[in-house]
Image (tube, grey):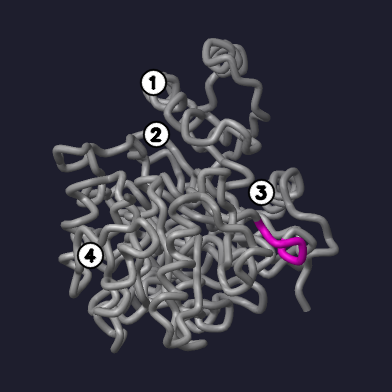
Amino acid sequence: MISVILAAPDLSDESGLVAAAALHDLVISRRSLDAADLLAAAAADTTMAVAVSAGVPRLSGDLIGRIIADERIVVGIAATDENEQRLRAWNVPNIIRHRGDPVETIAAIARIVSGRSHPSAFASATRVGLDPAGRHPGPPAAAPQEAARSSMLVAVWGPTGAPGRTTTALSVAGALADQGYAVCIVDADTYAPSLVAHVGVSADASGLVVACRQADNGTLNPRTLVAATRLLSDRLSILGGLVRSERWPDLREAALRTVWAVAREAFDVVVVDIGSCIEQEGAIAHLAGSPLLASRRNAAAVTALEAADHVLVTARPSTLGLTRLLNELPAVNSVNDVAGLTLVLTGAGGLMAPTSISNRMIHQLGLTPEIVRLPRDPERLERAIRDGVTPYEAASRRERRMLRALAKGFAPAPAGLRT
């Protein structure tokens, strides 16, 4: 007998599902009436399969994402087209259509949780990205049409201190937009969000929080994501970050992953400004070791790095700046070791460290990234902030040439440009 947690209080024949379970070697070990009860039941036993409908009170994409992260089998029960669409938006790996016959629905659930389901065996069961055991190994692969767009996600990271992350992110985003790409810059710093302050945009509400809430309720798509952004120029949009850093719990891990995926669909290039802290945070302990109730302030930075095609690493070319980089850069490589890597040394020309120091430091890490030096004029940057313009708009001709050359090194193919 296989134990299953059933959370389908919105189905009128939910009791019929429970009664039919024994006919197919299933045991309904827990009947959850709302999202909180489902979370508690799932945390108590990380091996138990879950069958859940879209109408569970207070159910969200974040909660579904936490349950899936436990590598258990999760089956979505959809009674309507709207329910099915919502479950798909939440990336539920197995979705079956309930057509009013509890026995048929339980039979479909039994096939999936026992590993016997096959698309040809039960047409209404949808299996997306499952391994042979029927588990969800991770985010679904990009569809062919998405790959054809040649979209790019660039994460901008730097070690502790003020290495110029936000200035670099804005400058590169401006350079890409100037070359004809549709660009969205996102403030995903959960410790010191400052992107909107740099460009003088109203911070009454956080676009990123709005996008995450839409991802949670299954309504996020390219159109609604674009609506949450603010336009800085013809081809440059900004998705503002937290208005106050203590609101970081609003940026949930599963929702963030959906935001990055949808942003790729909406824009040619997504530039994400993240905080320096990227260590994996500990989970609240449970008997079964479940991370379901973990507090993850660094989820925005970690998920952006995981999704990145290219990582821009910013650092001050001083002894302290290079030492911090030497200590913290391995953590970035541990999150994503396949993305392209460019080291951007920022600062005034007179502060540039000798090339030999930078090269020796990088050699110690066993990495061979491209190293770019970007001199900065502090007075020019201060004027840009006061005037509410991007650093790229305020840059000198020489600085613009350098930024365009930097952006050209990782920009997507021209075929991906949106009209």
Counting from the top left corner in percent of width and height, residue 217 is at 37, 77
Q: CA distance from mark 2 to mark 1?
A: 9 Å
Magenta residues span 142-146
The one nearer the camera, 176 or 115, is 115
For label 4, the residue is: 244
Going 15% across and 41% down the picture, which residue do you hit? 286
For label 2, the residue is: 159
Left or right: residue 340 compared with residue 204? right
For label 3, the residue is: 399
Q: CA distance from mark 3 to mark 4?
A: 32 Å
Left or right: residue 320 compared with residue 284? right
Q: Which mark is residue 327?
A: 1
Say which element carries label 2. Answer: loop
Q: Look at the image and tell me whether residue 28 can be seen.
A: yes
Going 37% across and 40% down the picture, which residue do you hit? 276
Q: CA distance from mark 3 to mark 2?
A: 23 Å
First in residue order: circle 4 vs circle 2: 2
User: Which amino acid type is marked by label 1?
Assistant: Asn
The one nearer the camera, 403 or 377, is 403
Q: Residue furthest right?
A: 415
Say which element carries label 1. Answer: helix
Counting from the top left corner in percent of width and height, residue 58 is at 24, 76
First in residue order: circle 3 vs circle 2: 2
Magenta-colored segment: predominant secondary structure = helix
